[in-house]
Image: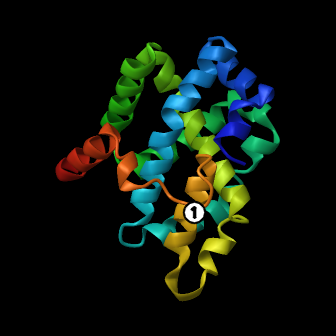
Amino acid sequence: MNLDDLLSNPQVLGELARSAGIGQGEAKTGLEALLPSVTRAMQRNAGGSNGLDALVGALGSGSHERYLDSPDLLGRTETRSDGNAILGHIFGSKDVSRNVAAHASENTGLDSGVLKTLLPLVASLAMGALSKQSGGGRSLQEAPGGGGMDMLGGLLGSLMGGGNSAPSAANDSPLDDILDLAKKFL
């Protein structure tokens, strides 16, 4: 499943819209604005010491693909909690999440409060797509010669609709600056 699949799934968009109290068009815009930041942060986090192992563990134990299989789960409190835990792990602080929402708000014109509401749901969807693509993390863990990071990059790149390539340095965004700054203070 990639970004185009998520953006064209009326059930996913409907549940995102319902959860945030917005229309489906706004939900699609929010998803488009937030998903690249979430996937880039996952990739950066997995590149740190023990990051890939932690991601594989989370993918293997979280049953995240359920959010794709049953989009109605997006409206549940547990899904938001799961998404907030994912954001805490990949961003490191609520301040980074707020900054990501504020940056997306500047780019889309959507209210930052709406984007803050969507962000944990987008994180849950991203983990669900990654879990589904990686067989619950097994393909990352079984990659020969430590090739799990390369495979992760390919999976995240395909989630973003870019085939088998990871987001490149050419795709750097202000999120990269936000994450770098946050790491200096944490």
Q: Nearer the viewer, residue 42 or 79?
A: 42
Residue at the (39%, 35%) spot, across then down:
97
Residue 60, image x, y percentages: 66, 65
Residue 19 left/right relative to 120: right
Q: Is residue 33 placed above or below 168 in the rendered structure?
A: above
Q: Quadrant of residue 7?
A: top right
Give above or below for 96 relative to 44.
above
Q: Which residue is painted at 36% across and 19% down in the image?
A: 106
Residue most toward the left? 184
Give the color scheme: rainbow, by chain, secondary structure or one colour: rainbow
Q: How many marks?
A: 1
Horizontal and vertical percent for residue 68?
75, 43
Can you tell which quarter of the image residue 151 is in? bottom right
Quarter of the image for residue 67 reads top right
The residue indicated by pointer 1 is 154
Left/right placement of residue 22 relative to residue 9 reads left
Q: Position of residue 14 (x, y in %)?
A: 74, 21
Whether residue 141 is situated above or below residue 19 in the rendered picture: below
Q: What's the amino acid at mark 1?
A: Gly
Q: Nearer the viewer, residue 54 or 14?
A: 14
| Position of residue 21 in the picture relative to residue 54 (left or right) | right
Q: Residue furthest bottom?
A: 145
Rendered location of residue 178, percent (x, y): 27, 41
Please report the residue visible at 50 percent of the width from the left and 58 percent of the height from the top.
166
- Which element is circle 1 on? helix
Q: Residues within 10 Å of mark 1 (few under 14, many from 20)?
A: some
The residue lying at 37 percent from left, 50 percent from top is 170
